[in-house]
Amino acid sequence: NAGVTQTPKFQVLKTGQSMTLQCAQDMNHNSMYWYRQDPGMGLRLIYYSASEGTTDKGEVPNGYNVSRLNKREFSLRLESAAPSQTSVYFCASSEWHPNTEAFFGQGTRLTVV
Amino acid sequence: LAKTTQPISMDSYEGQEVNITCSHNNIATNDYITWYQQFPSQGPRFIIQGYKTKVTNEVASLFIPADRKSSTLSLPRVSLSDTAVYYCLVGVTSGTYKYIFGTGTRLKVLA
């Protein structure tokens, strides 16, 4: 049982480049999330999808877009990467939002130079 | 600005009980309080969740006062492997609804 799988695990981008972070879960969860975690800081919610077909902004949505492709997959896109987006990105899923246990992926470490 | 605050760090010795508090003044009426543990280079892992009073599972207890403006995670008899960062997670309302992790508490367990 893989749980939540994120790809890639590491990525280096140049300023202005675009990329998509992929996330898939195999637990038949309804809700999915994207967080970022900066060095020495906690996790901040970028976007979430409470159920298939819906997406909502979190605390720090600027510079990002998301797509809930189907029930399993939730992608995060950086259209024009900036050094301020250097961070570790975590995807998570839960049975329902917000009051159920969330399962997290291993993270994607992104560096924008 | 809605904030969820925790002590930055705590040290403890093996075998002791550790209590970590989280302050969440603007917690949403219907939201639970959830605690997570995070080791370096890993995603957070669920520890415990509660709505009010006291909840206990095989690894921790969670104490929530009647006003629900704070919560306390209690780890009984910690071991070296409990060294990690601990986060609370709540939904808060301060104008708009936000789902916010606490600032995190770095627990170091000493031999």
Image: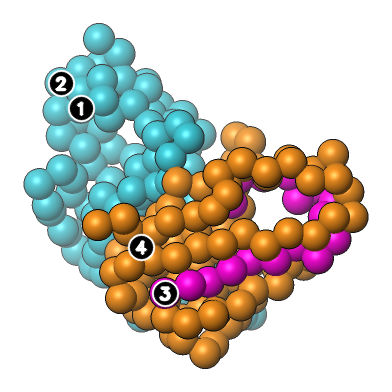
Q: Chain of mark 3?
A: A
- First-in-chain label (4 vs 3): 3
Q: Name the residue type under label 4.
A: Ala
In the rendered structure, does residue B87 fall within the stretch colored magenta? no
**Residue at image point 19% right, 63% down:** B53
**Nearest the camera: B5 or A20?**
A20
Residue A3: image quadrant is bottom left
The tint of chain A in the picture is orange
Secondary element under disc 3, as helix, strand or loop, is loop
Question: Residue beneath label 1, please?
Answer: B78
The quarter of the image holding the C terminus of chain B is top left
Q: Nearer the viewer, mark 3 or mark 2?
A: 3
Q: Alpha carbon of mark 1 to alpha carbon of mark 3: how far?
A: 37 Å
Visible residue check, residue A29: yes
Q: Which residues are magenta?
A: A72-90
Chain at tag 1: B
Q: Nearer the viewer, mark 4 or mark 3?
A: 3
Give residue A72's mark: 3
Residue that lies at the very extreme toward the top in this rendered image: B111
Per the image, the residue denoted by label 2 is: B15
Which chain does cyan denote in the image?
B
Q: As shown in the figure, which amino acid type bears the numbered disc 2?
A: Gly
Q: Is the residue under label 1 in contact with that under label 2 (CB below 8 Å)?
A: yes
Depth check, mark 2 against mark 4: the one in front is 4
Residue A3 shown left or right of residue B63 in the figure: right
- The image quarter containing residue B3 is bottom right
Q: Chain of mark 4?
A: A
Residue A53: x and y, percent? 52, 90
Please state which amino acid type lies under the numbered disc 1.
Val
